[in-house]
Amino acid sequence: MTKYLITFPSDAMDHIPQEEIADVAKAAHVCCQELIDAGAYVLAGGLADQPSSIVGTGGAVTDGPRPHVVSGITIVDVPSRDEVAAACHCAQEVREVGPDRELEPMLTEAGEKP
């Protein structure tokens, strides 16, 4: 199957009225439970209000600025982009996570699923 990274911009829920936020969060958790039950869930989490560091090409580490602001991510493992659930009521970006063919033998040797 193919892994997809779903990112949520920091302003993704700005259009949702405050009184509906709890319902939207509950719907998102229902969606995650469905992904878990289907064996497609890989990872999800929020990134809002967390510090970030930028590592430059020379290895120097500095605090921000972030190139773009992402408030949350979800990674799913599904057969196609069409399988990515549209249950979330906010803006999101869906991108295929391409495999690194050189890492696959290392992962297999380590007993990991590539």
Image: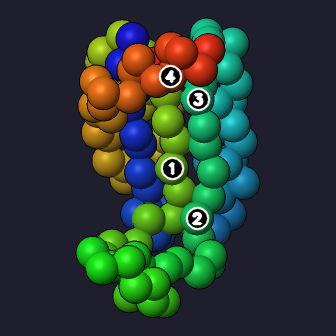
| 87, 33: nearer the viewer | 33
**Sequence-earlier tag: 1 or 4:** 1
In-image side of 43 versus 55 (left or right): right
Closer to us: mark 4 or mark 3?
A: 4
Which residue: 49% across, 36% down?
75
Mark 3, residue position: 42
First of labels 3, 2 by sequence position: 3
Residue 112 visible in the snapshot: no
Q: Earlier in the sequence, mark 2 or mark 1?
A: 2
Image x and y of residue 85, in percent = 44, 26
Q: CA distance from mark 3 to mark 2?
A: 16 Å
- The answer for how far apart the CA atoms under marks 1 and 4 are is 23 Å
Q: CA distance from mark 4 to mark 2?
A: 27 Å
Q: Quadrant of residue 1?
A: top left
* Disc sitting over residue 73 in the figure: 1
Q: Amino acid at mark 1?
A: Ile
**Quick one: label 3, few (<14), some, or many (20+) residues within 10 Å?**
some
Q: Position of residue 105 (x, y in %)?
A: 41, 17
Indicate which disc residue 107 carries: 4
